[in-house]
Image: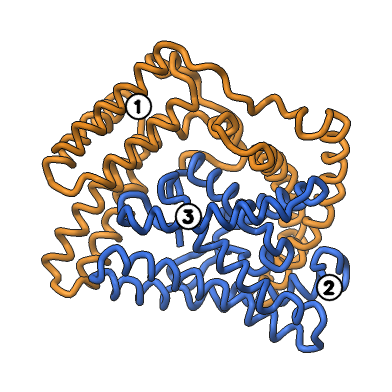
Chain colours: A blue, B orange
Amino acid sequence: MHISEGILSGGVLLAGWAGTSAGVAVGLKHTDSAKIVRTALISSAFFLASLVNIRIGPSSTHLTLLAPMGLILGWGVFPAVLVALTLQAVLFHFGGLVVLGVNTFIMGFSALSVYLVFGRAVRESKRGAVLSFLAGSLAVILAAGLAGVSLAMTDPNFLNAAKVLIIAHIPLAIIEGAVTVFMVSWLKRSAPEFLS
Amino acid sequence: MTRDAYTLEFSAPASGTTRKISPEVLVISSVIYALLVTCAESIAGLVLCMPLPAVLILRRKIEHVRLICLDLVMIITMGLTWPVMSEGLIMGLITAWRVDMIYVVFAGLVVPLGAGAVYSLPLPEKLRVLLILTVRGIFILRESLQTALISVKLRAPNVKGMMKLKVFAYVLGGTLLKASAKSERMMLAVESRGGFGGFRQGEGGKFGVSDWCVLAGMGVYLAVIVVA
C-alpha cells in the first residue's frame, strides 16, 4: 500500500502533505503526555506488523492493523502513522520521505474514518463482532481506494492500475477484518480501557 | 531488506566523505534529490539526475535484487493496465528509472544512519519524543512478541487458517497489554527526567562548513535540473 517515490505528481504530493499536516496538528493536540506512550506503543505495533508476512496462496502480504489503531487511538492515529511510516522510510526505504505525506494521509484518514464511523458502536453494540469485521475490512479497502485515487489524480491512465490495486487488497481486507474481530473482542474482555 | 528490527538504532561505520557531513544534512539532501527526480519530466533532466546515484553505486554496496524484482513487477503491471501496452511499458521503464535513482540515494545516504537520522530533524518536540519512544517501543514489543510466537509454535505447531489468525490477534493483544505496563514505567522515567525536556538525544547540532557546502551544492543541482 506504500506508494513509492517518483510516481506521484507535485500537486498530489502537496495535497497529501497538506492533509497530513492538518491531521498531525489535530492529532498532537489530542495527544497529551499521558497518552503519548500508548501512542508510541501502537505506532510500534503498526511498524512491527508490517514485518510479519502472511501467506495467501503463492503470494504473501502483511498486516496493517489500521482499524485497531484507529479504534484505540482515535485522532491520535495521524502522528502514530506518521512516525511509523517515517521509520519505515528511513530504515527500510518502504515508501519514502517525499511521498510520506500522501502515504500518511492514506493510512491515517482510513484509520480515523473507521474510528469516527464505528468507534462508539464497536464499544457499545452487541453486534460488536460484525462491526469490528466491517471496520477492519473497510479500513484496508478505503486505504487502497485512496492510494488508487492518488495514482489516478497523477495520471488518468493509472485508473486500471488503481482498480487492480483495490482488487488485490480484498484478501488482506478479509484477513484484517478477522484479526480486528479477535483483537477487539479480546481487548473488550481484558482491557476495555484500551478502546475507550 | 537492508535492516531488520534488531538493528534499528545501529548506524553503519562512518566512511569517506559522508562522515564529515551531519546526518540531518544527508537526510535533507536526499529529500531535495527526491524532489529533483520528481520534478524532472524530460529525459535530459533524468539523465542529469544520474551522477549522484552512479557515484553511490560505485562506492557503496547497494542491495539490488529486491530493486530489480520491484522494477519488473512495476513495468509489467503498468504495461498490462495502461490503455496502450507499449506506452505503458515505456512509462513503466521511466517510472522504474526514477524510483531506482531515489532508492539508491536513500539506501546509500540515509539508511546507514539508522533511526538517529530523524531524531535531529527540526520537528515539533512532541513528535520527536514520539519518534524516540516508538523506537524504544519496537524493541519492547519485538522481544515480547517473539517470545509469545515461539511458545505458540511449540505448543501448537499445526495451527492453521482462522485459528492461526485468532491466536495471532490474541498474542498481539496480550503483548500490547504487557508492553503497556513497561511503557508506564517508561513514562515515569520520562517524567523523572524533567518531562519532554529530558530528551536531549534528539537535539540537532550546528551546521559546519562542509554541511553548508553540501546544501549549496544541492541547491545548484536543483537549479540546473529545473533549467534543463
Label 2, on which residue?
A188
Secondary structure under the numbered disc 3 in the rendered image: helix
Q: In this view, does A18 lie above or below A121?
A: above
Work out how far the residue at label 3 is from the one at label 1, CA to CA, in angstroms: 35 Å
Amino acid residing under circle 2:
Lys
Q: Which of B167 and B109 is in front in this view?
A: B109
Q: In this view, does B228 lie above or below B197?
A: below
Q: Nearer the viewer, residue B92 or B174?
A: B92
Amino acid residing under circle 3:
Ala
Work out how far the residue at label 2 is from the one at label 1, CA to CA, in angstroms: 50 Å
* Of the image marks 3 and 2, the number of the one nearer the N terminus: 3
Please tell me the numbered disc located at residue A18.
3
Pinpoint residue A164: horizontal percent, then vertical percent.
35, 75
Secondary structure under the numbered disc 1 in the rendered image: loop
Looking at the image, residue A121 sits to the left or right of residue B32; the answer is: right
Pinpoint residue A62: horizontal percent, then vertical percent.
54, 62
Residue at 56% of width from left, 69% of height from top?
A110
Number of numbered discs visible in the structure rendering: 3
Work out how far the residue at label 3 is from the one at label 2, CA to CA, in angstroms: 35 Å
Callout 3 and callout 2 share a chain: yes
Secondary structure under the numbered disc 2 in the rendered image: helix
Cβ atoms under marks 3 and 2 closer than 8 Å: no
Q: In this view, does A164 lie above or below B127?
A: below
Pinpoint residue A78: horizontal percent, then vertical percent.
61, 56
> Which chain is mark 2 on?
A
Residue at 50% of width from left, 75% of height from top?
A141
Can you tell which of label 3 and label 1 is closer to the viewer?
A: 3
Q: How crowded is mark 3: few (under 14 residues within 10 Å), some or many (20 or more)?
A: some
